Amino acid sequence: MDVAAFLHRLENSAGYHGQVVHRQSLPPRDAVYGKLRQTLHPRLQAALAVQGIQNLYRHQAHAINILDAGGNAIVATGPASGKSLCYHLPVLQAILADSSARALYLYPTKALAQDQLRSLKALCGDGVKATADIFDGDTPRENRNSIKRSAQVVLTNPDMLHLGILPNHRSWARFFQGLRYVVLDEAHVYRGVFGSHVANVIRRLRRMCRRYGSDPQFILCSATIANPGQHAQALTGLTCTVVDDDGAPSGGKEFLVWNPPIVDEARSIRKSAGSESADLFRLLLRQRVRTMVFARTRRQVELVYLSVRNRLAEEAPDLVDKVSPYRASYLPEDRRRIEQALFSGDLLGVATTNALELGIDVGSLDATVLGGYPGSISSTWQQAGRSGRRAGDSLSVLIARNDPLDQYLARHPEYLFGRPPEHALVSPANPRILDPHLLCALYENGPLTDRDAELFGPTLKERLEQLAAEGLVRRRGSQWFLEPSVYYPAEGVNLRSGSASDYAVVDSGSGALLEQVEEGSAFFQLHPGAVYLHYGDQYVVEKLDIDAKTAYVTKQDMPYYTQCRDHTDIRVLHLLEQKRAGEVMAYLGEVEVSTQVVSYEKKAHFSEDTLGEEILDLPPQRFNTVALWFDVPADLVAWLKGRRMDLAGGLHAAEHAAIGVLPLFALCDRADIGGVSTAMHPDTGRPQVFIYDGHAGGIGIAEKGYELVDQLWTATLKVVEECPCEDGCPGCIHSPKCGNGNHPLDKKVAALLLRGCLGMTVHE
């Protein structure tokens, strides 16, 4: 791609109004090679030569040397750095030396497993004989027995390991006996609720290996994160050596930070990131530049695709079939078709959620457009890294959304390019996550004893006693047994969320299953009357059957989209910690959150005008989680009240801005966090701002915010005071998630409250 020529045309086009606020030139990088301590098997060396590989990069050799010495490793290097060879080569080396050796490859998605099987078979060729196959929900039943008996490398996902392999371990006895290596690819994805579940599945796997006399080594591969060693140990329970000396070459890249123009001066409203993404996508496609556009939501993916498709139909009809949307919730056969078309070059561009952020080989891409900050520095570089491989220049553009975090980055791009990536957080000891895995461990592998605390942590006895009180387990001497009434507990555990089930989206006319939606999001996306987008088509939810967890939809073209409103209450259950921070006290504790979707608004496309509001009658959803909260100076509160200033609006605005900024400090998405503010909370008797983990039991986000609360206040104050708007806008204190329609909000009071917390001078 001739990046300079494209940017010149772009900056001289009619739609360009100075949107590029920062340009970062990333120079090309030469390869740095390493040396193995032990020579590879001659057949393996020959197989590498066939692929044109004469030498291994520094990080590849480093990782293989660690494994050869009997250690465990986590490889944390950039996209397209050849991480898969770090585990393919040791595994194949072991199989060539001993045909009974086995390896288990775990991938977070089925698509990634399919892609890696192709790369493994390409490496094997004719000279390296190794039987490898995929075992997941799509594997034909007639093939499963042969895989269990003879496959030397099994590629699967944590869900199948949890649900299908561990509970049926007897039919996998030979595999477990020979298990030498376990691979966790894309380990940075295993964070939050999902990662906490996977950490417990890995502990169950290690317990099973002990039963069959094996003690496998672990190889993890990850995008760059701040705590790779700590994260690997949290996932596996084992010490893992960090390999981050990336020796892979890369082409040059121009990375632009793009801030959409203001279209409403009075309210400081900017053109939407989705609209800008679609415009830039269309321009790139018309120049025949192979492009991937990332959007933050499923709905935004569909809207970007629709906009580009419609414009191309007028301007370049031959390109209409060269672009497609892509989402994880599409049916498997649709995803495989799109992936193959992108890889083969039949598609020129795709609009996608982060489902294509992972290392699926989709061929050579020249440009990536990020329609909004992905929520972490790690994900930003993963998405940007999908364009540009080992040679040639590429382009990446981060388009800022109209929210506090994105606008902060647009004004402070040095944060994006000058800071290390965030920490990946898991909480495997979370009782809501650990308890069901203890039941699974009992079902599949017999009684638990004190020795198992080495795997499941020091709270094991406490959790077993609680399960006994619930009538699920029974103690005999030093052993804990599963009650006979508990059958196949793995079926009740959904690794992808804190909930055990999803809602089905069904076409009322045909009865066809369109998608699956996580239970926690169902009332927000699938309430009666909701407009739901699928493959560029609009569907209206006619009925939500809560008992059957099914939404029945009808295809209709509507002149509006829907946005629900909700009401949230929070109760303090148990104070865990408190500390002095700045001029006030900050707290960390367990809370109960109650959220009820109460209505939805019909919003006109493009103009965003409200066309009407409908009341809903849905039950509240309650869960216990962890929250941080903080006081505000009492003298400042009195001062504000004496001047009849809006304390409630200031607290609400500070809450919104702080929630928007917190992902700067914790590897999370804004959607993972919730908040409540009140001028007088009944449990504390004081004005309060709460920020809580949006997942039952908590996943460490609130703890990170509590730990860094001074930095959180400082960054939040910058967002509020540096935003050019007068009274507040989506770039500082407005929230797209606000259940109260962003009312009341007071930007000035929010700044005063934050200054007061930090002990700074307060000016009226």
Image (cartoon, grey):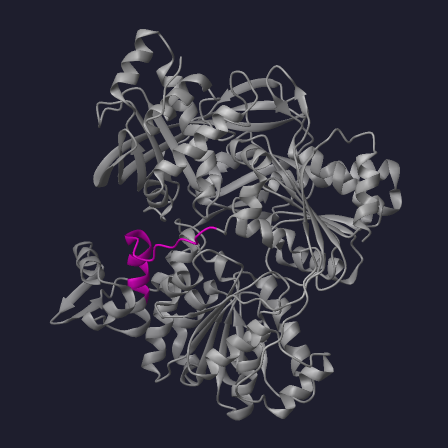
Is residue 399 shown to the viewer in this render?
A: yes
Residue drawn 40% across and 36% down?
712
Percent x, y of residue 693: 37, 41
Residue toward you, 516 or 92: 92
Residue 587 in the image: above or below residue 560: below
In the drawing, does residue 434 fall left or right of residue 240? left
Residue toward you, 614 or 679: 679
The image quadrant of residue 93 is: bottom right
Percent x, y of residue 259: 65, 33
Task: Point out the stretch of residues depicted in magenta.
Answer: 422-440
Percent x, y of residue 224: 52, 58
Q: Is residue 432 magenta?
A: yes
Is residue 744 shown to the viewer in this render?
A: no
Q: Is residue 653 magenta?
A: no
Residue drawn 35% across and 48% down?
700
Residue 750 in the image: above or below residue 621: above
Tag count: 0
Percent x, y of residue 33: 62, 75
Give the quadrant of the C terminus.
Answer: top left
Outermost residue on the left side: it is 477
Outermost residue on the top side: it is 643
